[in-house]
Amino acid sequence: MVRNIRLNLFTIAVVLICVGIVMIYSASSIYALERYKDGFFFLKRHLSFLLIGALLGLLVMTMDYKSLKRWAKPLIIASVLLLILVLIPGIGREVAGARRWFRFKAFSFQPSELANLAVIIYVADFISRKGDDIRTFAKGFLPPVMILGLVALLVLVQPDLGTTVALGVVVFIMLFVAGVKFSYLLSVVLAALPLLYILIFSVPYRRMRILAFLNPWLDPKGSGFQIIQSQIALGSGGLFGAGLGHSRQKLFYLPAAHTDFIFSIIGEELGLIGTVGLVILFMLFIQQGLKVIKNAPDKFGYFLSLGLILMITLKAVINIGVSCGALPTKGLPLPFISYGGSSFIFDIISVAILINIARSGEYP
């Protein structure tokens, strides 16, 4: 039983990664040829990210996941330092007004992805150590929320509201499952709502995203352009799609076709069959992840696997929802599928940790 769950989790992740490799090349080759004079530009970079992720994943699988408890605080400290450094001009790289990346020659690194993993590990370790004290305000609720608040503030300054909200939701669910009083969580949510309103409606591009979500045709050539082109891609695919490589929207109509909106290209080229098949793969992945959570050998493994599955699930739901026009544009990649170095590598590391926890569990 243990071997079956590990094998299923690994197989589903590999299938998703393979789908991503094919679709990244299909979605990016013409754009890459036009901009970089190399149709394989993004594919080659993605394969290099895969190699790095695979090596780090193998390293994680060789260690005892319980040793991550010792790294919980150092990882938080390192993440905070990196999130501060990335904001410094000349150190962090600015793209389209956002300062989220370190640039190392051909490679870039997004510290918020490390911060996501670090916070999940820290909260899982904190919950496993506190026992019944987790139900108290001062000893159980306040410390992890303060850590979350510090990391969230630094990510917001980049600015990256989508990642901040996703991480906050994951941590609050972990705390709720651990037994933190719902009134504590609700009070923070209610207190954060005015700030969230200000963050959205006082920033022009975020306000336009919300208005475009409500009615993209109010500004079809501006803020509503991505949503409209995404829906055109999904709609034109029909049941069976236009065929692999035959997307028209990737011909400079749909921005971020190989990153944030790769689901739309899948819908156009592989049709409803392709998108439903992809959703089923994610559902199977989540199902196997739930088995890991249910049968985790200790409290730390339980909450660590819960946090990782929640983060992957949330990113997938948000990305697919944005592509379909069911959610406002957030800029979160589709796990295992989208082109994106840091997020892709940490998705692989997350799977490696889940397999590690599953290997240590005792299944009936």
Image (cartoon, rainbow, N blue to C red):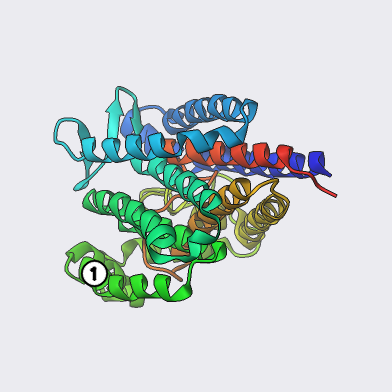
Query: In the image, 117: left or right of 287?
Result: left
Figure check: 59 above or below 76: above
Residue at position x 47%, y 50% in the image: 123
| Element at label 1 | helix
Residue at (32% x, 63% y) in the render: 225
Is residue 258 visible to the viewer in this orientation of the structure? no
Measured along the vertical axis of the image, is residue 269 above or below residue 109? below
- Side of 14 where 143 appears, left or right: left
Residue drawn at x 43%, y 42% is 118
Location of residue 75 in the rendering, given as x and y in whole percent from the top left corner: 40, 36
Residue 59: x, y in percent?
A: 58, 25
**Amino acid on which disc 1 is placed:** Leu
Q: Which of the pair 94/154 is nearer the observer?
A: 154
Q: Nearer the viewer, residue 38 or 164?
A: 164
Quadrant of the image containing the N terminus = top right
Q: Nearer the viewer, residue 54 or 60?
A: 60
Can residue 111 be seen from the camera position used here? Answer: yes
245 relative position to 231: left or right? right
**What residue does disc 1 label?**
195
Q: Is residue 349 above or below residue 56?
A: below
Please give the name of the residue rendered at 40% of the width and 65% of the height, measured from the top-left corner: 137
Q: How many marks?
A: 1
Outermost residue on the left side: it is 89
Is residue 163 or residue 308 the one in the foreground? 308
x%, y% of residue 276?
65, 61
Mark 1 neighbour class, 10 Å CA radius: few under 14, some 14 to 19, many 20 or more: few
Where does the image place residue 113, in percent across and percent down from the top left?
A: 40, 42
